[in-house]
Every structure is written in C-alpha cells, then in structure tokens.
Amino acid sequence: MLPTIADLAHVTTPRPADWEGGSLVSLLTSGGSGTVQRLREEYVVHFPHYDKDALGPASAILLGDYKLIRVYETGQRLLFDLAQDPGERRDLASQLPDKVRDLDARLTTYLQTVNAQLPTLNATSFRVPIRSRSRPEVSPRRQGGQGRKTPQRIHAEITCAIRPSVKLVPQRSK
C-alpha cells in the first residue's frame, strides 16, 4: 500500500530499489483497467508467529491462479487453484507436486532475499493435524451425539493442553 499512498500524495523523492508492493493508482483512476508494476510477479504473505489461526506460523505465496501455504508446525504444503476454488476447500498438493515444488522454491528464495524471520516452533504445543479444508473437524462421540469443532473450540483445547491450570468449559450442544 505504501507505493499507492506515495503516488496519491505526489511524493517525488526517489523510492528504494527494493521497495515492496506496487501502486494501485492506475487502477483507481482508470476504472480498474490499469496495471500494477511490482518487483516480483508473485505475492508473498509471511506470518511466522503463533496467533489464533489453527495453522500456526505459516507463509503463503500467490502466483497466477495458485496459492501455496507452507505450514511450519507440520511441514505441510497446501496448494489451491483460486480460479476454480476461491474458498480454498480442495488441497491440490498431492495432485500437482511440480507446482508445489516450484512455488515452494520461489517462497524460500523470497524469504531468504528479504532475510525473513522464521518461526521458532513451540515444542510444548499440542499439534493438530491439518486436514483438507473441505472436511470440517468432527469431535469424538460424546453424550448428545457428534458436533463440529469451531476454530475457537480447537484453540481452547490446545490452550488447555499447554496450560493445565486453564479449565475447559463444556461445549454446548446445538
């Protein structure tokens, strides 16, 4: 966004050669028919920290119609064709291993180029296997039948596994 803000503010100071991003001004002023000039054709999102996301620390690279997610906790790679599957429900990693290798190599090169901080894995964390996003997590049979676990419920269970002093409130049946 910084290049867009600089262009809108008519900043004339030369910009650093390695400035990330591209200006959206041509798109904004031409009804969306302009182009964005960027240093790289791929777009990378890198979040090496633990937060409320069930994936944990992860990086993603978008190139063309494809998005690859690198999950640091498990080493898993998730691949999605955003043109066919914008909701990211069908992981294509096992069907397109060459595309996974290509995007993963580009992601590694990018992270090395920008000297990105890599995550320090939490050795005491409770590891949850990541399944295809098309199959929701189903909790084990309990009194009252089965139910889907929400991301908040999974987070609460992980917190209780890490910190025994935290007590889990029973999930209400729907």
Image: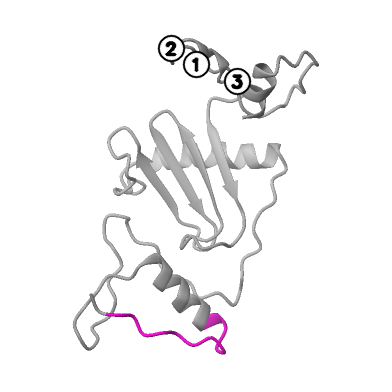
Q: What amino acid is at disc 2? A: Ser
Tell whether label 1 touches label 2 (CB within 8 Å).
yes
Between the residue at mark 3 and the residue at mark 1, the CA separation in whole angstroms equals: 9 Å
Horizontal side, residue 172 vs residue 16: left or right: left
Give the residue at mark 2. 33
Query: What residue is at 40 percent from the left and 35 percent from the top?
Result: 66
Query: What residue is at 59 percent from the left and 25 percent from the top?
Result: 40
Q: What is the span of residues highlighted in magenta in the rendered image? A: 161-172
Disc nearer the start of the sequence (2/1): 1
Along the viewing direction, whichever of 164 and 70 lies nearer the viewer: 164
Q: Is residue 69 above or below residue 142?
A: above
Give the residue at mark 3. 23
* Res 100 quadrant in image: top left
Q: Is residue 89 above or below residue 49?
A: above
Between the residue at mark 2 and the residue at mark 3, the CA separation in whole angstroms equals: 14 Å
Between the residue at mark 2 and the residue at mark 1, the CA separation in whole angstroms equals: 6 Å
Q: Quadrant of the N terminus?
A: top right
Q: How is the image coloured?
A: one colour
**Residue neighbourhood size for the residue with mark 2, other residues' Cα within 10 Å, grouped as few (<14), some (14–19), many (≥20):** few
Give the residue at mark 1. 27
Residue 39 painted magenta: no
Horizontal side, residue 42 vs residue 33: left or right: right
Along the viewing direction, whichever of 133 and 24 lies nearer the viewer: 24
Q: What amino acid is at disc 3? A: Ser
* Res 157 quadrant in image: bottom left
**Residue neighbourhood size for the residue with mark 3, other residues' Cα within 10 Å, grouped as few (<14), some (14–19), many (≥20):** some
